[in-house]
Amino acid sequence: MFSPLIDQLINALKQLPGVGPKSAQRMALHLLERDRHGAKKLADVLGQSVENVKRCERCRILTEQTLCQICTNPRRDPDLLCVVESPADVLAIESASVYKGLYFVLLGKLSPIDGIGPKEVGMDELNARFENENIQEVIIATNPTVEGEATAHYIFEHAQKYTIKATRIAHGIPLGGELEYVDGGTLAHAISSRREI
C-alpha cells in the first residue's frame, strides 16, 4: 500500500517498545506529513546518539563520557552501591530523589534457560568493584520476578564473600512488577525501607 521507503520507516518504528503496526504507521505519517523538521531533527539526534553514546566504564549506564555524571559526582556516597537490571531502573530510582549512592547496571538478569549467566550480566565487573572499592552496603534492586530474585540471591552470595552488607528493596514494589513503571513515591519508600538479605 505504501511506497517501499515509507514501509521501511514504519517497520523501523515498530522496533520501539510498545509500538505496534498502527502506532508506527501514525508516527511515520505524522512525521512525513506534518513535521518534516521534527523528523530531520529526530534522525540527526538518533544518528549522533548511536555514534557517540556508550556505557560508563564504572556503572555501565548510557553516557557520552568515559564516566557518567553520577560516577563523577563527589557528593555521591561511594560506600553505597545499588545494583539494578537496566539504565531505565537508574532513572526511576533517581527520580525518587532519595538515593545518594552509586550504581551498577547488570544489563539483564540471570536466566539460564535463555543462556544468560553471570558473565552476561557483568558479575566479573561487579565482583571487581566489590574487591577494589570500599563498598559498605550493596542495595539489590533487581525486579521482583523469578529471574530477578535469583539474580539478587546470586549477588548476595558474592557480597558475603567480601563481607559487604547486602539489602534488598522490598516494600511497595509488586511481585512481577518492573522498576521503570513504579512511581517515585513508591520507589522512595522501597529504598528507605530496604531490608537485609
Image (cartoon, helix red, strand yellow):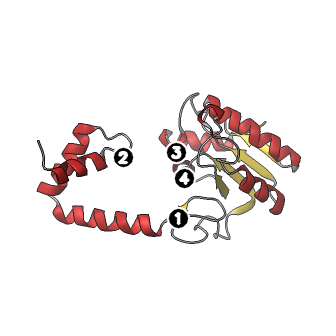
| For residue 174, above or below residue 30 | above
Q: Are marks 3 and 4 in contact (CB under 8 Å)?
A: no
Q: Nearer the viewer, mark 1 or mark 3?
A: 1
- Identified at 72% across, 61% down, the residue is 77
Percent position of residue 178, x then y: 53, 37
Q: Distance from label 2 to label 4 (Cα)?
A: 16 Å
Q: Nearer the viewer, mark 3 or mark 4?
A: 4
**Badge 3 or badge 4: first in the primary sequence:** 4
Q: Distance from label 3 to label 4 (Cα)?
A: 16 Å
Q: Nearer the viewer, residue 84 or 44?
A: 44
- Identified at 76% across, 58% down, the residue is 129
**Could you say which disc has been placed on residue 54 in the image?**
1
Q: Distance from label 2 to label 3 (Cα)?
A: 24 Å
Residue tagged 2: 16
Residue type at mark 2 is Leu
Residue tagged 4: 87
Identify the image quadrant of the C terminus.
top right
- Identified at 55% across, 39% down, the residue is 186
**Badge 2 or badge 3: first in the primary sequence:** 2
**Badge 2 or badge 4: first in the primary sequence:** 2
Q: Distance from label 1 to label 4 (Cα)?
A: 12 Å
Q: Are marks 1 and 3 in contact (CB under 8 Å)?
A: no
Residue type at mark 1 is Lys
Label 2 residue SS: loop
- Identified at 48% across, 40% down, the residue is 181
Q: Nearer the viewer, mark 2 or mark 4?
A: 2
Label 4 residue SS: helix
**Badge 1 or badge 2: first in the primary sequence:** 2
**Could you say which disc has been placed on residue 184 in the image?**
3
